Amino acid sequence: MKIQKPLHIIFGALLFCSTLAAQDIHNSLFNMAPLSLNPALTGAFEGTARIGGIYRAQDFGITDARGYYSPSFYVDAPIIQGFRKQDWIGAGFMVYSDNAGSLRLKTNISGLSGSYHFAIDKQQKNVLTLGVQWGSTSRKYEYGSGVFSDTFDESLGGLGNPSTTDPLGIQTGGGTKPGDNEENQTSYSDINAGLMFRSTVNEKTRFEIGVAAGHITTPNYSFEGGSSSGNPNPTPTPAGPKDRPMKIVAHGRLLTQVTDLLSFEPTFLFQTTAGQSEIGIQAWGGYRINPDAKANFGLGYRVGDAAKVLLGMEYKDLRAALSYDITLSDRHRINDYNGAFEIAAYYIIKVYKKPNVKPAIFCPQF
């Protein structure tokens, strides 16, 4: 659907100048980003180590506006045995970068995760896991890259100014001209925690369910008081809370082998922060091509926002997936139904110790 260019510009400015608040980590393929979803997923697999990544591009279909571009990378492993023989401890590391909007708001997150997997039974069919994650976040934006409403033509509701008089877009010291790409930045530490239960019901069915809390310490993430190159008098942030609101996440999935070739996997995600909530459901189907390869496909829906087309594949210990969000809300009039695109993959490394077998020499007796 085509609409007039000024409307694209206005929407882009309103949407992306407001990204100083930033969206939290947000993935359609949330199960492919385990350390971002719940720290209790750290080391929750069979193998030596897992290495993976995910890339998301959002709102790229809006003319004259920069969208969100968010790459992420992680590695984790079950490292040592726990206090009991059937328990184990996991550790992991993740990095995430989010680039958003006309102000080029950039958020970089790095986090260290640890988890304890408590096996309820000796066969490890039922496992309760507690995970904790400590992270460091830095945020910055560029003054001169913004599009401010007072520069819009008067017919579009602006003031028609040739250059902005918005305090956010003007350097207040150091002799820098308005519009130069000066940056304001801030950083803070963060703590997340999660709990998860996994169960192997039988040879054909297993499920997991978990809950996580993010930003437990509600750190101050305001730009006010932060430093900016060449700007000794930092511009205050727009009115609003200075503390990062706590985020609550609930997730679950059920995997069942319908036949020798077909599998079915429904999954859900619920998260809420600062009074805003997201509910997402997905249904994956799998077809076993051969003993080493499997094709996955499915559909998903984020309530009140978008439908998802899902594709994936598995080959031995490699898993990859693609998703495409089709905007169904009123926002489709701006982005022409182009919501978001994601690509993700991970690989599980398996290194097993070779048994140290001492040779035995048999001496025949006559």
Image (tube, rainbow, N blue to C red):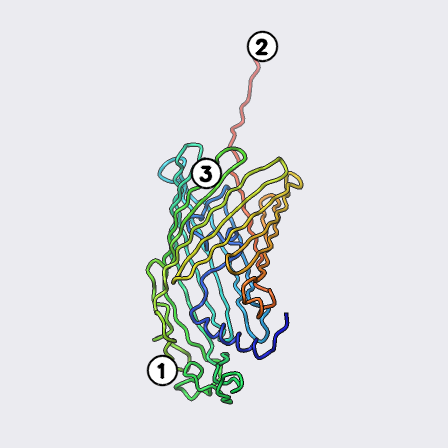
Q: Residue at x 47, y 86 (%)?
A: 164
Residue in the foreground of this view, choosing between 328 and 335: 328
Q: Residues within 10 Å of mark 3 (few under 14, many from 20)?
A: some
**Which residue is tagged 2?**
366
Tag in front: 3 or 1? 3
Which amino acid type is marked by label 3?
A: Ser
Q: Which residue is mark 3?
A: 199
Q: Residues within 10 Å of mark 2 (few under 14, many from 20)?
A: few
Q: Report helix, strand or loop for mark 1.
A: loop
Q: Which residue sits at x=53%, y=74%? A: 11
As helix, strand or loop, the secondary structure at mark 3 comes to strand
Residue 185 % position (x, y): 41, 73
* Amino acid type of the residue that numbered disc 2 sits on in the rendered structure: Phe
What amino acid is at disc 1? Asn
CA gap, disc 2 and disc 1: 99 Å
How packed is label 1: few (under 14 Cα within 10 Å), some, or many (20 or more)? some
